Image (cartoon, rainbow, N blue to C red):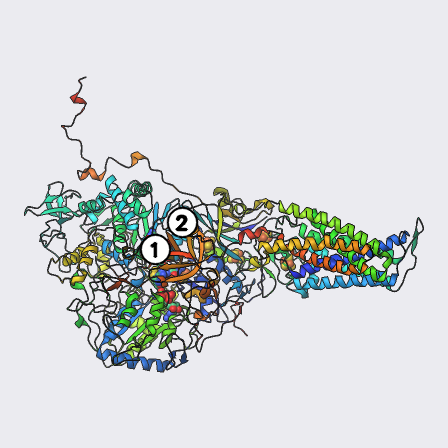
Amino acid sequence: MTQLALVIDLNVCVGCQACVTSCKEWNTSGSAGPMVDQNPYGADPTGTFFNRVQTFEVGEFPNTETVHFPKSCLHCEDPPCVPVCPTGASYKRKEDGIVLVNYDKCIGCKYCSWACPYGARELDEQQQVMKKCTLCVDRIYDTSMAEADRKPSCVLACPTSARLFGDVHDPESAVSLAIRESGGYPLMPEWGTHPANHYLPRRKTRIKIHEDELERADNPLKVDRQLPRPATNEPTLDDFTTW
Amino acid sequence: MHPAFSVIFLTTLIGAAQGLFLALFTVQSYAAFKLLPQPDAHAFYGQGSLMALLLLVAGLGASFFHLGRPERAWRSAAMWRTSWLSREVIVLPAFIGVVFLYGLVHWFGWHPVLMILPGDLPVDPSAILGVAGTLLAFALFVCTGMIYACLKFLAEWHSPLTIINYILLGGASGFMLAAAFAAFTAPEHVGFLAGWAAIITLLGLISRTASLYRNARLKPKSTLQTAIGIKHPKITQKTQGFMGGSFNTREFFHGQPVAVLRGVKWFFLIAVFPVPLLLLLSAMQGYSGLLPAAFGLQYLGLLAERWFFFAQANHPQNLYYQSIA
Amino acid sequence: MQAVKPSVPPLQEVKTTTCYMCACRCGIRVHLRDGVVRYIDGNPDHPLNKGVICAKGSSGIMKQYSPARLLKPLKRKAGADRGAGDFEEIEWEEAFATLAERLGKIRATDPKKFALFTGRDQMQALTGMFARQFGTPNYAAHGGFCSVNMAAGMIYTIGGSFWEFGGPDLDRAKLFVMIGTAEDHHSNPLKIALSKFKRDGGRFISINPVRTGYSAIADEWVPIRPGTDGALLLAIIHEIIATGLYDREFLVQYSNAGQLVNMAESNDEFGFFVRTEVPTEEACYEPQDKLWWDRNTDRAVVTHQKGADPYLLGEFTLSDGTPVKPAFQLLQERVSDYTPEWASQITGISAATIRQLAHEMGVTARDQKIELPIAWTDSWDNEHDTVTGNPVAFHAMRGLAAHSNGFQTIRALAILMSLLGTIDRPGGFRHKAPFPRPIPPCARTPNDPRAVQPNRPLDGMALGWPSDPDDLFVNDDGSPVRIDKAFSWEYPLSVHGLMHNAITNAWRGDPYKIDTLLIFMANMSWNSTMNTAEVRQMLNDKETEGPNTGEFKIPFLVVCDAFHSEMTAFADLILPDTTYLERHDVMSMLDRPISEFDGPVDSVRIPVVPVSGDCKPFQEVLIELGTRLKLPAFVTKEGERKFRDYPDFVVNWETEPGSGIGFLAGWRGKGGEKFLRGEPNPNQWEMYEKNNCVFHYELPKSYQYMRNWNKGYLEWSQRNRITRYAEPILIHIYSEVLQRFRGAAQGKGLTRKPPEHLRKRIDTYFDPLPFYYEPLEGQVTDRHKYPLAAVTQRPMAMYHSWDSQNAWLRQIHTHNYLYVNTRTARQQGIEDGDWIWVESQWGKVRCMARHSEAVEPGTVWTWNAIGKAAGAWNLTPDANESQKGFLLNHLISEELPAGGSARVSNSDPITGQAAWYDVRVRIYKVGAGETAVTSPQFAVMKPYPGMKTRSSILAFLGMKQK
Ligand SMILES: Nc1nc2c(c(=O)[nH]1)N[C@H]1C(S)=C(S)[C@@H](COP(=O)(O)OP(=O)(O)OC[C@H]3O[C@@H](n4cnc5c(=O)[nH]c(N)nc54)[C@H](O)[C@@H]3O)O[C@H]1N2
Ligand SMILES: Nc1nc2c(c(=O)[nH]1)N[C@H]1C(S)=C(S)[C@@H](COP(=O)(O)OP(=O)(O)OC[C@H]3O[C@@H](n4cnc5c(=O)[nH]c(N)nc54)[C@H](O)[C@@H]3O)O[C@H]1N2
Ligand code: SF4
Ligand code: SF4
Ligand code: SF4
Ligand code: SF4
Ligand code: SF4
Ligand SMILES: [Mo]
């Protein structure tokens, strides 16, 4: 069975927020929209977004890591948000594992959002229905688009390609490979939700330089007479012993 | 969580109504076994049911304010197989219906004997409706409680105590109301009802303090470490990704300082338990005029209790929404 | 939502153009529905961004339909104060008539009195040409307050630079060191490259007082104290030379490291290269007449002689008795005291880390060499079978540039890069056409005030590259000709002008008063000015004595902007520009094109939606004005209009009649068969349109590397008139250009001499070898009183002050905080989120503090230009931007005391680069009961006539509202 998902590589995410606004842009005038903005030009502007990028500081100066952390619906394999929905508006698609909300059925009771430990759902204050990441279901199957465009908007936008998209149930897919090889992990595994989205951790590259690598036989200082040989009249063993 | 007044009113009002109905039918059952005198059926059961009905409808009405799309509320019965909310949505009207019929038969004094049970117990429609109503009342308590108790990562709620509290606190306020009501319609039952009200309130005190005790000792299972999957003792959020607030900052946090939380807790602990108990005691000493005050105060206390119930629940999603920058 | 069965109509139209939510200029596809922009994504076929897009680019819709847009030409109501924002609508005809009359008079009398300054635009080709045609020297773009140090420091050293002129080759680098960069102009491409680099196992080091954005994903963060990178780089050079980790061969062949410098102190030639007579070809810029001391023959020989190999170290005596030293020897002497231990005290970075950095750089460069099988020929006719690369790449930006010691620091960086042998080589630094240029590039300003004449174009360029004191644009008494004092003795190499001093100077009448100031695309009453509060006052100040009493000190102020910016409030005349989606634009080879490492690239914008309201592209305004003023380039001999409009101008205008060089390099020639040079092609726009709005010429592989000394490339470039000379461009380890100024200050040589009061300044700072000095502001600051350095950073999701009107972007950055190291804050009793005062010598600001572990303890920082004036950008007066957001600029002075009553610009003494990041501050908690609003506050700006009203709820659908 297919389970589509995003794999987000924290090793390269620079927190640019491209995925945030490209998601908004695609979806607000797409089939998941509109996504309202309240007070767009006033105090405390607020709006519906499916994807947010947050920043955390790990450790203390000077050993600080700054971590940018994008988060949208994780399309859990065992999504607690679905069974609680009284109307069936929230559902998980059998064919590809995408968790969706049917706006026509949703009564805006917010119960599903309570049932999501990740804070991935947002009630649209204008339409009063629950909204969330759709994995761009209206792009990825749209055959009127070029094949290369049939990917989530945020994935195509991401300048560092920190967002991988694919089938995490297919062991040969790029996303599965990335999870396997780069130590992909789910969020809050303690709740057994089995998020389909995974995160790839930071990885460090170091250079090890051995003391004896610094100076080589072809050191240019020699050429310029700057690594002088000791003068012949300085003491040596020859002044001391005979063998 | 952010306490929504619609839900606070819904749960407290229907809780009281459920308790009231249970009180009415308890009296009827005792009377059937001749353990209590029969009250004036029209006044006590009929008007009592009407009162329960009013509370239920008020509660139901309040619940609509919780919905973004109330005009579609009918859809919410669909998922009874999985959703406690859906089940509540089914049980609540069923209960309302039964209470209505129960009140109706009493109101019009329609008591044809349908059968006689061993021990010479005549069964009339009100008895059957009463039993059905009782089952539904408990079912409704379970549904309401389970709506909260089934959310496993809301540790404050995820406990049998949640359901027990719903039952006991709804029961207490319902019996309290019944006692107050009896003072006008069936004074001979005031003592009985007040006694039960006191007992249930006491039990409620025990179970509610038990849950407070439990909640105070909860260790959140989710931490920033599990939330973002980084193992380090010192992690702080610098920005949640937006600054003007969002659904996630409004819905899952009460937005009150700790002092308010503590104040509300002490208020409800006093208003729901000791003071009504004292008033009950004095009522049983003959000052039954105090009963409406006892109920009123306890109900107020329950509003605070429910507010606190929501406010105290610490949703793990809040780990992701801590810092504006 | 009905999945897969979209309930909304499909997109109807896709048009390609070029983004301008920032200066990166990515290719975009604009998807329209019912003529309304519905979706903007990156163009996968564009060489720059290859399909990706950023947060700003994706929010273009909210710019296009923003209620902050200006939709009518406006004039200040008679009697209204500047800044009050009292305007009335006028028609374009009135605007043109007013301008043509006023400018016509100025041109006929004293063209200097018209000043044109432009901000973050990308059309200096046109604006610069207009100013020159008009005849005024008072023209500059944003470079002076932006990053001229980066341009000049590197171009004067290696003939190219970062910024838009070149960059790191992360494709092949193994080690990447990023210094003082938060976002930069190569926004998307840098991100693409960085992630690829990391995934390919490259090691990434970031040197920055703050760890955010790019630095966040660095393998190592080196938190440096602001303004001290010079010390760090010099210590690294020290260590590289001490351990012999430099690429000797590279230095010998391709730099002036081996050239002999005259060491006879009494001699007029002291400090200059020793020259000899060599036969030179006619068109020669820098004859190769210098000497080496040959190791093989142990005598002086002309450089690059076959078989010769110079000593880089040592001292020698010429046959005439002149003591000489190779330039590299002087460098070694220069850095001998710059030990890691010394630098550690200044930078706050441990000596061990400094050594480690030097060793990583040196060993990686030496031991991980790349050999590409690409044959090429160097300028001395040596054939090479391969191109070699030392895979250590650097990138640096305003963290180095925006300090008053930036030029010398950046010279140190360019020299370090050269020592490692990484210039225009795989895995190192790579040029982008039209770079490399000769050192310095050939363009010159006039050097004589008589170049400014009534009714005549300026005799020379308004901006250029001085190579010696005689190139300065000064009056006979040595005083500046330009209003911003660029190219004067105060800032001799101010190659991008000093826009940040234009208003103050004009207000004061120093060096003189002007009549009309035209500001295009710069928010100079807010974020691109220092000392903001007072500059706003200057804009509104009136003469109190003399014949013009009661007149504004700057009599006429014209602002061309697209939005309701703080600046527009001060205008007498507002010219409403279009958005980038509504106009034709060119990113021309004559300005700063979007070239790639592999060859020249230029690009265009083509309108995708009709012009809104009564907007008009500024390009059209300039063409119309030029025509009305009968500037020679815009009219025929008979004085008739030459160009219908801007697109027509772009196609048909040539630098000189028949030169074949125009704004666009692609599809030239009658049928579009030529490139770079060729007759005008009437269908040029269509061809750009068909080709994703971009022209990309890929050089043959053998021309793609070593271009400073690549004979094939240099000749190709000369043939195509990219450059005048095809001589090798040797790296200036030792800068004779600087020495010429220093010599003049020491009274040597035949050139002009600086005025007395500036001699010491020139003598000190025009050191031909890089050195470290404390930034100028630090030199006049009590460090105990103002212990902290304050800097800003670019947020990736905002462009300067542009984007607060953008409903989506402003939700991400609604206001800003001052970030303070947790321990530093606690020492002051400042808790996370507290209101504080930030105070410099020049002013104070009230704002909110945030604790952070990702900032060096002696530094505080904030996001740049998030704070706004109340009501500006058509935001409500209570919007967070003005109530909680703040502008650091209030704390930064545009001038520093220079002894007595004298003032000097708060800038690098060499280039005039604005020293934004030199400011020193202290912080303390606000008093109890102080209001929780930022300070200073200004009178609330009102919306102007003709603007749309802002809605309080927005649900963008991308469909025509029925
Ligand atoms: N404290 C501090 N100050 C700084 C800096 C810093 O780092 N710290 N950085 C400096 C640097 S490097 C720079 S480049 C400057 C930038 O400063 P500015 O050049 O002033 O940049 P913006 O604030 O973006 O203002 C540009 C103006 O262009 C307008 N505009 C936008 N699009 C269009 C258009 O299509 N047409 C027209 N006509 N106008 C348009 C905007 O409305 C705005 O008013 O700021 C400088 N100021
Ligand atoms: N999104 C976005 N992109 C932009 C712009 C924008 O406004 N928004 N502006 C564009 C413009 S006009 C410009 S000029 C470029 C500028 O591009 P950058 O140079 O990247 O811009 P800044 O944000 O000024 O970055 C300065 C960095 O230097 C660090 N720094 C400050 N002082 C020092 C120091 O002394 N030493 C070191 N090592 N680091 C120091 C700061 O912490 C900061 O990270 O960006 C361009 N790109
Ligand atoms: S992340 Fe939340 S909303 Fe998404 S599937 Fe999982 S539980 Fe449901
Ligand atoms: S808000 Fe909508 S989707 Fe969520 S539980 Fe209620 S009905 Fe279902
Ligand atoms: S997959 Fe689509 S809906 Fe989900 S976050 Fe990305 S762009 Fe938004
Ligand atoms: S677009 Fe990519 S790099 Fe930018 S914040 Fe999103 S995931 Fe990170
Ligand atoms: S980097 Fe600049 S040009 Fe490129 S998409 Fe973003 S805003 Fe547009
Ligand atoms: Mo800039």
User: Residue C401, percent across and down?
Assistant: 30, 56
Asked if residue C419 is positioned above or below residue B72 in the image, the reply reads above
User: Residue C888, percent across and down?
Assistant: 38, 61
Image marks 2 and 1: residues in contact by CB distance under 8 Å: no
**Relative depth, front residue between B216 and C461:** B216
Q: Residue C786: which numbered mark, if any?
A: 1
Asked if residue C274 is positioned above or below residue C7 in the image, the reply reads above
- Quadrant of res B50: bottom right
Asked if residue C268 is positioned above or below residue C868 in the image, the reply reads above
Residue closest to the far top: A243
- Quadrant of res C23: bottom left
User: Residue C171, percent across and down?
Assistant: 36, 49
User: How many numbered marks are there?
Assistant: 2
Q: Is residue C450 visible?
A: yes
**Relative depth, front residue between C222 and A232:** C222
Is the N terminus of chain B in the top left, top right, bottom left or bottom right quadrant?
A: bottom right
In the picture, measured across the screen, residue C153 lies left or right of residue B247, that is: left
Q: Amino acid at mark 2?
A: Lys
Which chain letter goes with mark 1?
Answer: C
Q: In percent of the image, x 74 and y 60: which residue is there?
A: B296
- How many neighbours does mark 1 have within 10 angstroms: few (below 14), some (14-19), or many (20 or more)? some
In the picture, measured across the screen, residue B128 lies left or right of residue C270, that is: right
Q: Amino acid at mark 1?
A: Tyr
Q: Secondary structure at mark 1?
A: loop
Q: Is residue C246 visible?
A: no
Given this view, does label 2 or label 1 mark the residue nearer the observer? 1
Residue for badge 2:
C196
Mark 2 vs ligand 6: CB below 8 Å: no
User: Residue B18, percent across and down?
Assistant: 77, 56
In the picture, measured across the screen, residue C810 lies left or right of residue C962, that is: left
